[in-house]
Image: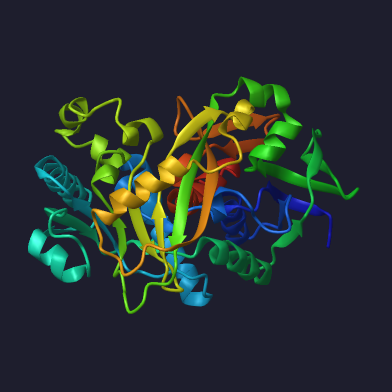
């Protein structure tokens, strides 16, 4: 490998990898450095749902761009993308009202969605409980991926396009020069680049500890689980439910959202732990169920602990059983993921000496928004907006 690049990206998760993807497509010579043998963070510890429908207007645009990018890559190289759509299921009249209002917003934004009656929902979704569902809002363009498969196959695809990937290697020093940047790694490697983008929170903390401590980054811990393979059962799309309707940013733009939220019990278990119920069938026939949200400052991630809160897991399962009578709720895997986000902005961005760009804290928008956001950000960093 030649040790001189136009761009070096730190962090092999979805946000860093799509920055590399767009730079490669612009004809730049690019390297990606991942501190582990393969990504271990939020990118591989989530549902793998690409759902622009759940985002506010700004990020929905990035998410819709991401959908096009995922589908374009899938047409050339199998990265596990499946276009099966997403549905939000309303459990009461307030949630039905929010679905109707979001449908109007989507229509004005030319984003395809379809309101389904209770009867249509019951016909389309096997074992959905009649005493739960009132209506649904379906988004046919949305996709899902197998996260742990997708990111590694995306790396394989980008290697074919000329990306150099260094794995199991941490950047210990990042020096801005008169022209460009020089990096020193844990394997005694010296690399130089015109630009560096840091998308890895760990290396952000190592390289710029004071800036990291002064940032408004917080970390969210999410609990998820995976059932055993469901015998003779197919869930036709990703499913988001009433608690998701009450949580997702997209619905906050609906006229009745604020008044509906005011009526909620602020002391409820689901509010305390940020629980909303999602279902996604994995490629092996199992169902991924979750999730929850527990927060701590990024500098005090230890406060979140190493253990799963079984009260949270048990609550999620009991709520899930009120929605679907799955053939089995036997759980084969449980885990938690962590992602960073900003308290006061939608993503953390900071530039050091013109050529070092820190881009992190994308929160729960990573799988959906990274591909579209990274396209715009590469254009901005390399001054290509009007090229």
Of residue 214 and residue 3, the one placed in the foreground of this image is 214
The percent position of residue 331, horizontal first and vertical second, equals 45, 61
Rendered residue at 78%/46% (across/down): 170
Residue 21: x and y, percent? 58, 59
Please indicate whether residue 141 sits to the left or right of residue 309 in the image. left
Residue drawn at x 70%, y 43% as measured from the top left: 195
224 is higher (above) or lower (below) than 355:
below
Q: Residue furthest bottom?
A: 232
View extreme (right): residue: 188
Which residue is at the front of the view, 363 or 96? 96
Color theme of the render: rainbow
Q: Is residue 355 visible?
A: no
Residue drawn at (30%, 38%), measured in percent from left and top?
247
Residue plotted at (39% across, 60% down): 67
> Can residue 381 be seen in this snapshot?
yes
**Nearer to us in this view, 87 or 33:** 87
181 shown above or below 211: below
Give percent across and percent down for residue 238: 33, 61
In the picture provided, is 315 more to the left or to the right than 41?
Answer: left
* Residue 134 versus residue 358 in the image, above or below: below
Query: Observer-nearest residue: 241 or 348?
Result: 241
Quarter occupied by the N terminus? bottom right
Q: Residue 261, percent across and down?
A: 21, 30
Position of 21 with respect to 117 (left or right) is right
């Amino acid at each position: 490998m030649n040790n001189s690049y136009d761009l070096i990206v730190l962090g092999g998760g979805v946000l860093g990898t799509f920055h590399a993807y767009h730079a490669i497509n612009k004809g730049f010579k690019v390297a990606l450095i991942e501190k582990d043998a393969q990504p271990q963070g939020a990118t591989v510890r989530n549902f793998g749902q690409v759902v622009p429908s759940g985002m506010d207007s700004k990020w929905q645009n990035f998410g819709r761009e991401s959908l096009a990018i995922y589908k374009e890559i899938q047409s050339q190289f199998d990265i596990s993308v499946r276009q099966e759509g997403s549905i939000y299921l309303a459990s009461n009249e307030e949630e039905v009202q929010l679905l109707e209002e979001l449908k109007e917003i989507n229509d004005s934004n030319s984003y395809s969605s379809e309101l389904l009656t209770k009867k249509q929902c019951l016909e389309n979704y096997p074992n959905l409980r009649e005493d739960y569902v009132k209506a649904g809002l379906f988004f046919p363009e949305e996709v899902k991926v197998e996260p742990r498969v997708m990111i590694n196959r995306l790396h394989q695809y980008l290697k074919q396009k000329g990306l150099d990937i260094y794995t199991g290697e941490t950047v210990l020093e990042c020096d801005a020069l008169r022209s460009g940047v020089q990096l020193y790694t844990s394997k005694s490697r010296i690399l130089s680049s015109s630009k560096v983008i840091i998308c890895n929170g760990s290396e952000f903390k190592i390289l710029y500890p004071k800036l990291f401590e002064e940032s408004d980054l917080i970390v969210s811990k999410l609990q998820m689980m995976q059932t055993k393979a469901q015998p003779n059962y197919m869930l036709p799309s990703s499913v988001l439910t009433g608690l998701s309707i009450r949580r997702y940013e997209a619905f906050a733009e609906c006229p009745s959202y604020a008044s509906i939220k005011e009526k909620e019990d602020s002391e409820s278990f689901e509010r305390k732990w940020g629980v909303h119920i999602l279902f996604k069938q994995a490629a092996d026939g199992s169902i991924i169920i979750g999730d929850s949200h527990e927060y701590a400052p990024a500098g005090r991630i230890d406060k979140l602990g190493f253990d799963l809160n079984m009260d949270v897991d048990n609550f999620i399962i009991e709520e899930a059983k009120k929605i679907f009578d799955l053939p089995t709720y036997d759980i084969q895997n449980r885990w938690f993921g962590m992602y960073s986000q900003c308290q006061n902005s939608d993503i953390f961005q900071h530039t050091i000496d013109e050529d070092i760009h820190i881009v992190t804290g994308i929160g729960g928008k990573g799988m959906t928004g990274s591909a579209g956001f990274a396209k715009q950000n590469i254009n901005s960093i390399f001054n290509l907006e009007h090229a």
